[in-house]
């Protein structure tokens, strides 16, 4: 095509601008034509056009569009006009659009729908469930795009072949990709994450200057954590495996940044970051340490009596992520109430614990044994628990103590954890394989059979899934309200304790030790009242979710169904009230007793409030926060387990109502893949992944 010229040498700037905008507008129209042609591929819920163009016609239209674009490009090039380079990434644009969709569905919740009229109470859970389900899918799509172009399950599985047999998982990944079973990708991703190594977090607790940083440096055999300085203990520091030493620091409101190991003190010490004015929220240190290669993560937690405050809030919020707690105690000093408090909190949260005595070099061998026995006896007598006590030192010449402790105490717990993870992984792979088989089989079913399967039982099971999903927010609100009430139970506990203690004095049965025990029992009972209600609510709801999932699996005719306690298994022991160590030194006034129990009770109540009232109020307040965190964490885990099944079941319900494959080749592919699923490995058997040798530790 010959370039169009004006009366001068070329078109003027206004003419060139008009030519460019016309071509840009025409290209936009061509994109709209392409979107119209792709209507059959889009599968829109609300299609804009009928499919009245044959595939052959569509190919011809595409060819014409290609020729038109080629001519436009030649015209632009002949006038020195270059098409602009896009400034916005496709992934970013899609994520923004996804966020708009998320907001739109949020406005479909009952509280917003009431603007169009009263919403029936019976419809609220199902409406919430439908919104939660769609927002969950949007969230998964957004998370998938956020991982960037380098995220590739197939490549990750290829890398895993170097450490073990992942044939079954690769077969599953191929089938998911080939048939577009996107609803199973998050389950497969979770399995691959587990194959790549699930972290085992060992948290170290202790008072300031107990030697936690020095011990962690000795364990990883590298001087990475600052020692001899006041730490910012509100920010746990994690030591994890990495091919090269580096630090990663996250800040409030900002993404993380990489820092050199030598610069770590600028973020984690009080001297260089006083009061945490840099707003550090997370610190992760990567090291090529052999003791970290097995997936073990060492965590330096807030210290008791640190500049950043007490143990309670930050440590409690971290506890759900901890797999093993090590309480570090100075072997040259006596066991303190703070040390016992840490053990109480760990056991109250259901976390295995051990005591590690540091600075063993300051004691003779005989004194080391005496110190170890003393600590074990104190923990046993005051807390009623038996736990291992190990003695270590970071001084030169004592490395064998750390190696022996790591070998005898840490690795066995880790091995048990890994074996349980492998068993869970086998179940997950078996369930995923079975669900994919059902999804593929549904595509082979004739439309008549598909309609037959859409029975009232299936419709009810699907509706129950939506309704149950919507109740999670309701249950969470109830549990948070009940947990909030715990903080104010201290006053009523003091009043009841005063009444009972007066009664004990009237019966001439007063004994100071017995009175102390009675007082603690009253406190525990008042805390337990709300805790029991919360646990009963959670257990009842967990039973409902297990039932709903089981009925959905049966309605779908799945070979494998969730276990009877798939969701209920999340709920174990609740945290118990920890009032700390105190000595009750009050008794009723005998003179006031002669005047009347009411006067004696009020007098004793005032004494109790003066002596331990502040401590009791703090204990109930902290316990309320602990229970709230615990219930939110457990509900979150329950929802994750529920969603992992419910998302798949809802997708299967939708597939059973769809049409059969359109051509014979598609049916042959499905038959072949079904044979691969059944023949590659028995259902439920997980691939073996080689663990690093024990020598590496």
Image (spheres, rainbow, N blue to C red):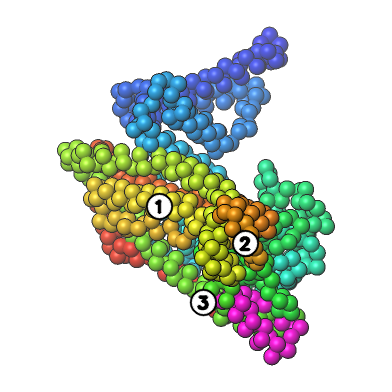
Sooner in the amino-acid sequence: mark 1 or mark 3: 3
Residue designated by label 1: 536
- Taking the view exactly as shown, the residue that stands out farthest to the top is 7
Dot 1 alpha-carbon crowd within 10 angstroms: few under 14, some 14 to 19, many 20 or more: few
- Foreground of the two, 212 or 514: 514
Residue designated by label 3: 412
Q: From what the image shows, is residue 327 above or below residue 571?
A: below
Dot 2 alpha-carbon crowd within 10 angstroms: few under 14, some 14 to 19, many 20 or more: few
- Foreground of the two, 142 or 81: 142
User: Is residue 512 toward the left or the right of residue 687 in the image?
Assistant: right
* Magenta span contains residue 377: yes
Q: Residue at x 36, y 42 (%)?
A: 468
Circle 3 SS class: helix
Magenta stretch: helix, strand or loop mostly: helix
Circle 1 SS class: helix
Q: Position of residue 408 (x, y in %)?
A: 56, 81
Which region of the structure is painted magenta?
351-380
């Amino acid at each position: 095509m010959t370039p169009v010229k004006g009366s001068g040498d070329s078109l003027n700037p206004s003419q060139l601008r008009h030519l460019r905008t016309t071509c840009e507008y025409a290209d936009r129209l061509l994109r709209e034509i392409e979107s119209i042609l792709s209507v059959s591929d889009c599968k829109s819920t609300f299609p804009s056009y009928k499919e009245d163009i044959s595939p052959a016609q569509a190919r011809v239209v595409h060819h014409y569009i290609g020729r038109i674009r080629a001519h436009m490009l030649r015209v632009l090039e002949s006038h020195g006009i270059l098409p602009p380079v896009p400034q916005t990434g496709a992934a970013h644009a899609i994520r923004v659009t996804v966020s708009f969709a998320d907001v739109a569905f949020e406005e479909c919740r009952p509280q917003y729908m009431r603007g169009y009229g009263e919403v029936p109470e019976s419809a609220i859970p199902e409406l919430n469930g439908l919104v939660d389900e769609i927002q969950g899918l949007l969230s998964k799509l957004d998370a998938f795009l956020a991982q960037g172009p380098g995220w590739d399950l197939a490549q990750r599985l290829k890398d895993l072949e170097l450490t073990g047999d992942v044939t079954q998982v690769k077969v599953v990944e191929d089938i998911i990709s080939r048939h577009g079973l996107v609803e199973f990708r998050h389950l497969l991703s979770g399995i691959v994450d587990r194959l790549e190594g699930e972290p085992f977090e060992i948290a170290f607790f202790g008072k300031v200057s107990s030697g936690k940083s020095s011990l962690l440096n000795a364990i990883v055999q590298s001087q990475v954590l600052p020692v001899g300085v006041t730490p910012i203990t509100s920010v746990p520091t994690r030591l994890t495996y990495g091919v090269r030493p580096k630090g990663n620091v996250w800040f409030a409101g900002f993404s993380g940044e990489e820092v050199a190991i030598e610069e770590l003190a600028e973020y984690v010490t009080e001297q260089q970051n006083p009061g945490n004015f840099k707003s550090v929220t997370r610190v992760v240190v990567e090291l090529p340490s052999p003791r970290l290669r097995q997936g073990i993560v060492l965590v330096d937690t807030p210290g008791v009596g640190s500049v950043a405050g007490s143990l309670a809030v930050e440590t409690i919020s971290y506890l759900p992520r901890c797999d093993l707690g090590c309480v570090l105690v100075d072997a040259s000093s006596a066991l303190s109430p703070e040390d016992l408090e840490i053990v109480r909190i760990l056991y109250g949260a259901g976390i295995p614990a051990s005591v590690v005595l540091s600075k063993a070099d300051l004691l003779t061998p005989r004194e080391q044994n005496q110190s170890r026995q003393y600590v074990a006896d104190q923990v046993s007598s005051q807390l009623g628990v038996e736990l291992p006590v190990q003695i270590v030192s970071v001084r030169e010449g004592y490395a064998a103590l750390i190696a022996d402790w790591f070998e005898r105490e840490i690795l066995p717990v880790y091995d048990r954890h890994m074996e349980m993870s492998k068993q869970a992984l086998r179940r997950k792979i078996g369930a995923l394989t079975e669900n994919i088989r059902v999804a593929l089989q549904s595509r082979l079913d004739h439309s008549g059979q598909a309609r037959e399967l859409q029975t009232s039982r299936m419709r009810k099971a699907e509706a129950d899934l939506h309704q149950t999903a919507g109740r999670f927010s309701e249950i969470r609100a109830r549990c948070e309200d009940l947990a909030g009430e715990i903080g104010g139970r201290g006053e009523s506990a003091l009043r009841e304790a005063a009444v009972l203690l007066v009664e004990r004095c009237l019966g001439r049965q007063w004994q100071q030790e017995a009175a102390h025990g009675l007082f603690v029992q009253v406190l525990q009972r008042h805390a337990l009242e709300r805790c029991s209600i919360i646990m009963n609510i959670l257990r009842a709801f967990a039973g409902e979710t297990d039932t709903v999932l089981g009925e959905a699996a049966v309605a779908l005719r799945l070979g494998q169904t969730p276990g009877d306690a798939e969701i209920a298994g999340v709920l174990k022991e609740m945290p118990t009230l920890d009032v700390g160590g105190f000595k009750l030194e009050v008794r009723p006034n005998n003179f006031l007793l002669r005047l009347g129990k009411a006067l004696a009770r009020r007098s004793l109540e005032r004494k109790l409030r003066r002596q331990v009232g502040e401590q009791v109020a703090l204990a109930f307040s902290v316990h309320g926060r602990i229970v709230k965190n615990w219930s939110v964490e457990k509900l979150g885990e329950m929802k994750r387990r529920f969603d992992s099944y419910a998302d798949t079941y809802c997708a299967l319900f939708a597939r059973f109502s769809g049409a059969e494959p359109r051509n014979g080749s598609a049916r042959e592919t499905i038959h072949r893949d079904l044979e691969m699923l059944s023949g590659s490995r028995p259902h439920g058997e997980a691939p073996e992944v080689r663990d690093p040798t024990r020598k590496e530790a």
